[in-house]
Amino acid sequence: QVQVVESGGGLVQAGGSLKLSCAASNVFGLNPMGWYRQAPGKQRELVASITRYGSIDYADSVKGRFTISSDNAQNTVYLQMDRLKPEDTAVYYCHVRGWETPASGPKDYWGQGTQVTVSS
């Protein structure tokens, strides 16, 4: 069974930093891996994604403040969040696309979400 587990959320003051981690198990060939977020009353949005070849995309709102990285061998993806703002407050979800078995084809898998709260 595929598992996607996030960690690292919490409460931080504006201007502070947090680092999110995500580990996926029982799945291979992850491409891409990334982070989405959903604030109350808003749609889930892409924060950052990274392909297994190192291509990276960021939402405009986080460029220059957030850094995504990954370890393909360990099936892990990280999100370093610096200079956090109150508007970054949301539940952050890890997303991976990968293969559970060679016959399964690529599928999307999500973590359970981790709360990030930035106080002003």
Image (cartoon, grey):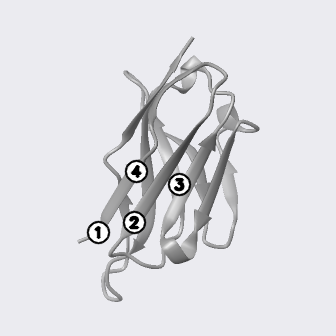
Q: Give the side of residue 107 with respect to residue 87, left or right.
A: left
Dot 3, crowdedness within 10 Å: few (<14), some or many (≥20)?
Answer: many
Q: CA distance from mark 2 to mark 1?
A: 7 Å
**Numbered disc total:** 4
Give the residue at mark 1. Answer: 2
Q: Position of residue 100 (x, y in %)?
A: 32, 78
Whichever of labels 2 and 1 marks the residue nearer the N terminus, that label is 1
The circle on residue 27 is none
Whichever of labels 1 and 3 marks the residue nearer the N terminus, that label is 1
Q: Secondary structure at mark 4?
A: strand
Q: CA distance from mark 4 to mark 1?
A: 13 Å
Residue 80 image-quadrant placement:
top right
Q: Secondary structure at mark 1?
A: loop
Quadrant where the C terminus sits is top right
Amino acid on which disc 1 is placed: Val
Residue 5 image-quadrant placement:
bottom left
Whichever of labels 2 and 3 marks the residue nearer the N terminus, that label is 2
Image: 9 above or below 117: below
- Which of these two is toward me, 86 or 100? 86
The circle on residue 34 is 3
Q: Give the side of residue 45 with respect to residue 79, left or right.
A: left
